Amino acid sequence: MNWHSLLLFIHVTSFAIWFGTVFASLFLLRTLEPRLTAKDGNTAEYTSLLHTYIRLETKVADTGFKTAVVTGLLLAFLFHGWTLWVFVKAGLIVLQVALTMGYIVKAIQPISYPCDAGEYARWYRLFTISLTMFALVLGVSFFLL
């Protein structure tokens, strides 16, 4: 059995799962925007749906993230070595998590629904941060490693 190929497959798949949860969240939030910014007072059901989705999505994203990190560390330790670019990629992952979690705590958690479109736009800024960091990590992975 080729352990390198297996670890690489698990690593790429778990990264794709993590990345996919971000896109799924973006599409869901785009779909829910008219309901969560409406002033008709009928947002309780959609707010509950959003909170339930976030709770479940977080479990999937966390599993994908943790698996990507562990397999990445195993690949570096067992096959690739600890090069400068491995540390750069690890630093970008740490930066992505710090920026994303910091923004969630600062700007997303305080939102109550219904909210105005300006407040709801905070969600899109979160996705801008997250997707920009994904692009940086993928750029480093494919072009510098």
Image (spheres, rainbow, N blue to C red):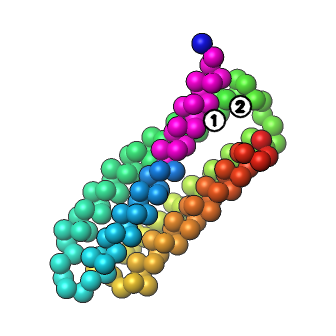
Residue 58: give x, y in percent of width and height.
Answer: 40, 51
The answer to whether the residues at label 1 and label 2 have Cβ atoms under 8 Å apart is yes
Where is the N terminus found, in terms of image quarters?
Answer: top right
Q: Residue at x 57, y 31 (%)?
A: 9
Considering the numbered disc 1 on the image, is that residue within a helix, a strand or a loop? helix
Q: Position of residue 54 (x, y in %)?
A: 35, 57
Q: Main secondary structure of the magenta part?
A: helix
Quadrant for the C terminus in the image: top right
Report crowding for label 1: few under 14, some 14 to 19, many 20 or more residues within 10 A (C-alpha). many
- As shown in the figure, which amino acid type bears the numbered disc 2? Ala
Q: Position of residue 18 (x, y in %)?
A: 49, 47
What residue did someone put label 2 on?
Answer: 76
Rendering quarter of residue 4: top right
Determine the residue positioned at 66% across, 50% down. 138
The residue carrying mark 1 is 72
Q: Is residue 58 above or below residue 10?
A: below
Look at the numbered disc 2 and give the secondary structure of its residue.
Answer: helix
Q: Quadrant of residue 128?
A: bottom right
Magenta stretch contains residue 125 = no
Horizontal side of 113 relative to 42 (left or right) equals right
Quick one: which residue is furthest to the right in this view? 84
Tell which of 134 and 95 is nearer to you.
Answer: 134
Q: Report the amino acid beneath label 1.
A: Gly
Q: Is residue 7 left or right of residue 115?
A: right
Between the residue at mark 1 and the residue at mark 2, the CA separation in whole angstroms equals 6 Å
Is residue 139 shown left or right of residue 40? right
Residue 5: in magenta span: yes
Q: Residue at x 62, y 30 (%)?
A: 8
Q: Residues within 10 Å of mark 2 (few under 14, many from 20)?
A: some
Span highlighted in magenta in the image:
2-18
Residue 122 x/y as whole percent: 47, 75
